[in-house]
Image (tube, rainbow, N blue to C red):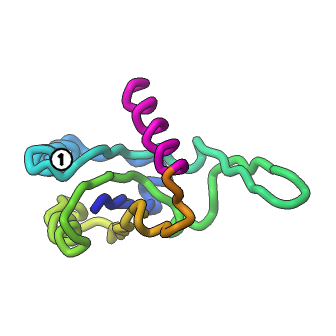
Amino acid sequence: MKVMVLVKATADTEAGVMATRDEIAAMGAFNEELVKAGIMLAGDGLKPSSHGARVRFAAEGRSVIDGPFAETRELVAGFWVWQVRSLQEAVEWLKRAPFNAGGGSPVEVEIRPFFEAEDFGDAFTPELQAQEQRLREQIDRNN
């Protein structure tokens, strides 16, 4: 099963407070463990919402809202994409992450499974599955 691990923003991440050398080294060591175990497919940190924008889609059109955004607890500061056998395996790996080792503000991390083809049932026709496969192959060639 493929999951996205969403690291929630904090007041510090939204203020642009950068990680220390020790924090970067600890996270690098954890990421290395994930890669060696074949778990980590992708991952990155995100700049504060003051560097971003949102696009709101409504019947009357689209509107752009520039950051920063007020509700820090609803923002994402980083992510991983992991390939695991189960949600429980993802939880066990995540418990080993070196968050809050220095005792700062609590960090909240969410794990969300990706949809699988079978989740869509009959609506995901063979033609649509073939289209999806072509797109994935094109993405791989583009990278």
Q: Which residues are magenta?
A: 127-143
Q: Quadrant of residue 85?
A: bottom left
Q: Position of residue 102 (x, y in %)?
A: 20, 62
Magenta portion: prevailing SS class: helix
Which amino acid does the dot numbered 1 rest on?
Asn
Residue drawn at (33%, 71%) of the image: 106
Residue 107 on the magenta segment: no
Q: Position of residue 63 (x, y in %)?
A: 81, 50
In this picture, is 16 found above or below 116?
Answer: above
Q: Judge by depth and name the residue closer to the eye, 67 or 31.
A: 31
In this picture, is 137 found above or below 22?
Answer: above
Residue drawn at (53%, 57%) of the image: 125
The quadrant of the image that shows the C terminus is top left
Q: Position of residue 111 (x, y in %)?
A: 34, 67
Q: Judge by depth and name the residue closer to the eye, 117 or 5.
A: 117
Q: Judge by depth and name the residue closer to the eye, 35 or 29.
A: 35
In this picture, is 143 found above or below 90?
Answer: above
Task: Determine whether, in the image, residue 120 is placed left or right of residue 86.
Answer: right
In this picture, is 131 found above or below 123?
Answer: above
Question: Mark 1 = which residue?
Answer: 31
Q: Is residue 22 visible?
A: no
